[in-house]
Image (cartoon, rainbow, N blue to C red):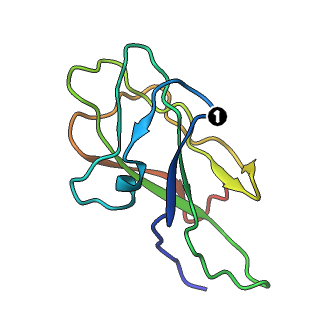
Amino acid sequence: MAFQTKTSGTIVDDNTVGTDVWTNPTNAALSDGAYTVANGLLDAETHYLNCQNFGFGIPVTGTVTGVVVDIEKKRTSGILNCVDKFVRLITNNAVAGNDKADTVTNWATSDTTVTYGAASDNW
């Protein structure tokens, strides 16, 4: 089966971790200038931004050979330390594979798309 590009059908603020709430989480579905925003409190950790229901059409006999996740993100220029904490895949309500977070690189102050995984990476 060919490479499939999908957008999340369900996006929610998940308070399993952190204290900083994501407002308007469904705005994360499209690159249209409408943002999902966390307050960016000093040293605050955000909740998870949980994206689900991508609607992949994988046949029962199909094999997934890789997963690519593109995330468009930016930080406000006044926020000095804004890095990934976790970038994970969830399947059947459990973490699957490796965490792909870049816990070192500060997010850019302009819209930047960052790619996690690869066409031959099953995480």
Q: Between residue 16 and residue 72, name the one nearer to us.
A: 16
Which residue is located at x 28 percent, y 46 percent?
112
Q: Amino acid at mark 1?
A: Thr
Name the residue at 42% across, 38% down. Answer: 22
Q: Nearer the viewer, residue 117 or 25?
A: 25
Q: Percent from the top left, x then y, of residue 86?
A: 57, 36
Residue 7 occupies quadrant = bottom left
Q: Residue furthest top?
A: 42
Q: Nearer the viewer, residue 58 or 41?
A: 41
Q: Is residue 14 above or below residue 65?
A: above
Image coordinates of residue 94 in percent, x first then y, are 76, 49
State the image quarter where residue 61 is shown.
Answer: bottom right
| Number of disc labels | 1
Residue bearing mark 1: 16
- Pointer 1: residues within 10 angstroms few (<14), some, or many (20+)? few
Q: Position of residue 104 (x, y in %)?
A: 45, 25
Q: Regarding mark 1 in the picture, which secondary structure is present there?
A: loop
Residue 83's spot in the image, x, y percent?
A: 43, 28
Quadrant (top left, top right, bottom left, bottom right) of the N terminus: bottom right
* Above or below 57: residue 100: above
Picture residue at 45% right of the left edge, 32% below the top: 21
- Whether 50 is drawn above or below 9: the answer is above
Which picture quadrant has residue 122?
A: bottom right
Residue 111 relative to residue 86: left or right: left
3 sits to left or right of 42 = right
